[in-house]
Image (cartoon, rainbow, N blue to C red):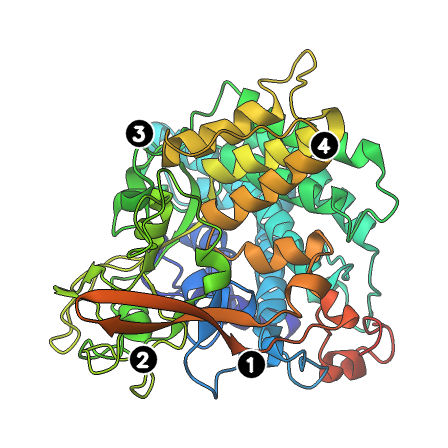
C-alpha cells in the first residue's frame, strides 16, 4: 500500500506541469506490477522530479514577484502580494507556501527515482526483454542516460533545498522516500548544515552530469554541469552574505568567489553574454543564447501579456507596474533632457520598462490627463510605468494570439555579478590572485559593457564603494528576474529599503511638453521577522512539535 501511495504521488507530481521541454506525464493506467516491469518507467520517474521547478512568471497573483520588492507596484488592491507589502505574512497566510510544498514534492520525486533504480534495479530494467547484441547501441545510450539521470536527481535535490533555505532558512533534510521513514519526524537542519548538504550533492555528482544537450535536443531542460555549478555559486554567495554571515566570516566570501570562479574557469562549459540584452528575453531567443545556463519552458501563451499590458490595450490589466525607485537608478549615458527624462539613459531602461512616450502595442503611450493612458483611469498604472521585459509587443489578446515565455532561472550575467560581489568582499575590487580568471571590477565591467559602452566608468576603489556598485548593477541587470527581494534580504538591507514608500511620476502636459513630478504611490512595511518566511501552522502541527517556527511568528 505504501508503494502504491508513493507511485500515486509521483504521478501527481509528474502531471503537474504539462507542455514543458520534458514529457513529465506518466501512464496512470499502469499498476505497480507493470511499472516494475517496464523500462519506460525509469524515464518517466526521471522526468517527474523536474515538474515542480519554479516558473517565475506565475510566482504570485499569476505574475512575477517584482511587486514584493521596490521594483514594482501591483495595480490590483486585492492581490496576494499585499501580504508582503504590508508585512502581513504569517503562519496562516503565506502566498509562497506552495513553493515549500513544491520543493518537497520535487525532493520526494528525486528520492523515489533514486530508490527505484538503486542496487542495480535500473540496469536490470534496461536489460529486460531486449536483445543486448542487436540492440547494443540503444542499450549503450540507455545506460548513459541512466547515469546522467541519477546525477540529475542529486542536483535536483540540491536545487530544491537551495530554494527552500532562501525562503525559510534551515529546513528538514530528507534523503529517502517516506516508505523508508514511516512515522519518523525529521527536525530542521541549520542553514549552514543545509548549505553543506547542497554543496556536497553538487560536488559529488557534478562530474557525472552531461556538459550540454547539443546532441540530445529532446533532453533540453534537464540539469547540466553548468546548471549545477550555477546553483552552487548562488548558494555560497547567499551563505556569505550578511543575513547568513553575521560575523562577516572572510572564509565564506572566499568560498563564494571560488564557486563562481569554478564556473567561469571550467573548460567543459561554454557560456557568454548575449549580444543583445533587449532581445534576449523575447520569445524563443533565450533557447539558443550562449547566455542561458538553465531555463524553464512552458507552452506558448498570452497570460503574461494579459496580466501586464496597459489597461488601455484591449485585454490588458496593467498588473506589475515598475516604480520610480527603480527607474531613477538607470544611469545617464549622455546629457539629461529636461523635457524627456528617459532619453540618454542606460538602454536597459528602454528594454525593460514602458515609459510615457514609448512605442508599445502599436501606439504611443500617453498618460497625461485626457490622453489614452490617462493615469486617472481605473486600473491604469499608478506609477506612470508599465512592464516591458519578457513581454511580446503587440499581441492581439482579443483574438488569443500567443507567444513563447521562457523563465531563465540561471544565466551567465548572474554568475559574473556573483563573482564580482564575492571577489570584492574576499580580495577587493582590483585584485585577482593566481587561479582566478579576472578581478571583481573586470567582471562587473563585462556586464556593463554589454549594456552600453557609454555607461559611466565604475571608479570604486574600496571594498565599500565597490559593494555599492555591485548592488546597483544587480538591481538594473537582473530587474524583475526574482532577485531583488532576496538580494535585499541577504544583504540585510530590507529593513531600510522595504520600509520606504514606492514612488511613481505624476504626468502632466502643457502644449506639446510633458512634465513629470515624483510622487509617493504606496507605503511599505517590512518587519525584522520577515527576513525569513514562516512555516504554515498546519505544517508545525502535523510535525507533532518536531518543526520549530521561525522567530517572531
Mark 1 element type? helix
Q: Disc 1 designates what residue? A: 82
Instruction: Say above or below: 261 vs 322.
Output: above
Residue 213 location (% of width, % of height): 37, 34
State which quadrant residue 5 falls in: bottom right
Counting residues from the N terminus, which is met first, the one under dot 4 or under dot 2? 2
Residue 489 location (% of width, % of height): 68, 58
Residue contact between numbered discs 4 and 2, judged by CB atoms under 8 Å: no
Q: Nearer the viewer, mark 1 or mark 4?
A: 4
Mark 2 element type? loop
- Label 3 and label 1: CA atoms lie apart by 62 Å
- Label 1 and label 4: CA atoms lie apart by 36 Å
Q: Nearer the viewer, mark 3 or mark 1?
A: 1
Q: Disc 4 designates what residue? A: 463
- Label 2 and label 3: CA atoms lie apart by 71 Å
Mark 4 element type? helix
- Label 2 and label 1: CA atoms lie apart by 21 Å
Residue 120 visible (yes or no): no
Q: Which mark is residue 134?
A: 3
Q: In this image, 450 relative to 264: left or right?
A: left
Q: Disc 2 designates what residue? A: 375
Residue 196 location (% of width, % of height): 77, 43
Amino acid at each position: 500500500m505504501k508503494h502504491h501511495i508513493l507511485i500515486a504521488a509521483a504521478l501527481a507530481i509528474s502531471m503537474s506541469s504539462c507542455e514543458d521541454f520534458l514529457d513529465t506525464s506518466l501512464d496512470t493506467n499502469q499498476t505497480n506490477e507493470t511499472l516494475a516491469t517496464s523500462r519506460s518507467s525509469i524515464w518517466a520517474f526521471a522526468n517527474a522530479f523536474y515538474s515542480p521547478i519554479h516558473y517565475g512568471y506565475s510566482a504570485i497573483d499569476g505574475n512575477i514577484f517584482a511587486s514584493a520588492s521596490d521594483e514594482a507596484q501591483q495595480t490590483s488592491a486585492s492581490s496576494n502580494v499585499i501580504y508582503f507589502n504590508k508585512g502581513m505574512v504569517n503562519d496562516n497566510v503565506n502566498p509562497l507556501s506552495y513553493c515549500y510544498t513544491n520543493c518537497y514534492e520535487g525532493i520526494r520525486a528525486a528520492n523515489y527515482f533514486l530508490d527505484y533504480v538503486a542496487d542495480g534495479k535500473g540496469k536490470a530494467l534496461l536489460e529486460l526483454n531486449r536483445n543486448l547484441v542487436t540492440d547494443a547501441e540503444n542499450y549503450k545510450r540507455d545506460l548513459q542516460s541512466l547515469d546522467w539521470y541519477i546525477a540529475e536527481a542529486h542536483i535536483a535535490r540540491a536545487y530544491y533545498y537551495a530554494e527552500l533555505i532562501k525562503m525559510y532558512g534551515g529546513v528538514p533534510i530528507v534523503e529517502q522516500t517516506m516508505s523508508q521513514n514511516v512515522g519518523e519526524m525529521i527536525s530542521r537542519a541549520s542553514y549552514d548544515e543545509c548549505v553543506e548538504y547542497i554543496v556536497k550533492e553538487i560536488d559529488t555528482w557534478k562530474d557525472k552530469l552531461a556538459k550540454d544537450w547539443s546532441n540530445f535536443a529532446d533532453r533540453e531542460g534537464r540539469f547540466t554541469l553548468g546548471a549545477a555549478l550555477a546553483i552552487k555559486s548562488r548558494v555560497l554567495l547567499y551563505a556569505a552574505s550578511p543575513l547568513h554571515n553575521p560575523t562577516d566570516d572572510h572564509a565564506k566570501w572566499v568560498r563564494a568567489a571560488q564557486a563562481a570562479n569554478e564556473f567561469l574557469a571550467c573548460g567543459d562549459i561554454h557560456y557568454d553574454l548575449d549580444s543583445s540584452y533587449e532581445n534576449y528575453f523575447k520569445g524563443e531567443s533565450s533557447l539558443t543564447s550562449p547566455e542561458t545556463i538553465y531555463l524553464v519552458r512552458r507552452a506558448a501563451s498570452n497570460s503574461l501579456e494579459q496580466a501586464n499590458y496597459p489597461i488601455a490595450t484591449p485585454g490588458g490589466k496593467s498588473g506589475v507596474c515598475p516604480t520610480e525607485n527603480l527607474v531613477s537608478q538607470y544611469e545617464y549615458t549622455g546629457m539629461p533632457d529636461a523635457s524627456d527624462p528617459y532619453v540618454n539613459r542606460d538602454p536597459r531602461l528602454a528594454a525593460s520598462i514602458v515609459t510615457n512616450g514609448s512605442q508599445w502595442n502599436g501606439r504611443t503611450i500617453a498618460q497625461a490627463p485626457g490622453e489614452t493612458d490617462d493615469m486617472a483611469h481605473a486600473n491604469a498604472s499608478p506609477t506612470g510605468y508599465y512592464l516591458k521585459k519578457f513581454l511580446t509587443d503587440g499581441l492581439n489578446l482579443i483574438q488569443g494570439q500567443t507567444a513563447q515565455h521562457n523563465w531563465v532561472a540561471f544565466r551567465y550575467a548572474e554568475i559574473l555579478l556573483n563573482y564580482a560581489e564575492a571577489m570584492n568582499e574576499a580580495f577587493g575590487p582590483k585584485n585577482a590572485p593566481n587561479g582566478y580568471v579576472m578581478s571583481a571590477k573586470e567582471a562587473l565591467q563585462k556586464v556593463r559593457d554589454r549594456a552600453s559602452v557609454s555607461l559611466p566608468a565604475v571608479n570604486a576603489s574600496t571594498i565599500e564603494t565597490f559593494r555599492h556598485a555591485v548592488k546597483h548593477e544587480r538591481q538594473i541587470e537582473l530587474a524583475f528576474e526574482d532577485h531583488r527581494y532576496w538580494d535585499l534580504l541577504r544583504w540585510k538591507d530590507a529593513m531600510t529599503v522595504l520600509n520606504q514608500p514606492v514612488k511613481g511620476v505624476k504626468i502632466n502636459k502643457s502644449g506639446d511638453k510633458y512634465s513629470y513630478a515624483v510622487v509617493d504611490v504606496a507605503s511599505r512595511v517590512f518587519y525584522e521577522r520577515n527576513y525569513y518566511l514562516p512555516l504554515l501552522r498546519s505544517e508545525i502541527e502535523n510535525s507533532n512539535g518536531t518543526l520549530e517556527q521561525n522567530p517572531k511568528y
